[in-house]
Amino acid sequence: MVTAPYPILIFDGECHFCRRQVLRWRRVTGDRVFYMSRQTIIADQKYLGISELGFENSVQFLESNGRCRHGADAVFRVLAHAGGVWKCFAALYDRCSAFASASEFLYRSVANARSYL
């Protein structure tokens, strides 16, 4: 398990859609989340314990405590660092399996179409 002094979102830096979303998220999270493209950490993948397939399939969020989240869960965790209503979405994801399932379905649908967005 890898720990960091701050949470890190790892995203596909070659994806235009991903880069646009990260710019939006940076505006609301400020310096509370560090953002890195997966292309910049390719050599450290194994150290992080995330497979190449994991990086290809979804964003990866490494929390300060070393826990790794991905997909919609990762998005809600990042946005929870913005505070306000965003924290509610992360809590709802944890407490309501129907919301979590629907969120992951939507995330997967967007991820599969991201080259068109």
Image: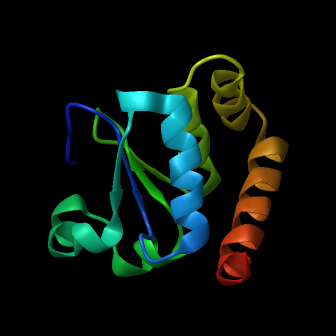
Pick the front one: 32 or 80: 32
Rendered view: 40 above or below 82: below
What residue appears at the point 53 percent right and 35 percent down from the top-left corner?
27
Quadrant in the picture for residue 21: bottom right
Type of colouring: rainbow
What residue appears at the point 52 percent right and 75 percent down from the top-left corner?
15
Quadrant in the picture for residue 33: top left
Rendered view: 49 above or below 87: below
- The x, y position of residue 74, in whole percent, is 53, 48
Determine whether, in the image, residue 66 is placed left or right of residue 47: right
Quadrant location, the C terminus: bottom right
Determine whether, in the image, residue 113 is placed left or right of residue 53: right
What residue appears at the point 22 percent right and 48 percent down from the top-left corner?
1
- The x, y position of residue 110, in whole percent, is 73, 69
Count of numbered tags? 0
Rendered view: 22 above or below 84: below
What residue appears at the point 79 percent right and 61 percent down from the top-left corner?
106
Determine whether, in the image, residue 14 is placed left or right of residue 79: left
- The x, y position of residue 104, in whole percent, is 72, 58
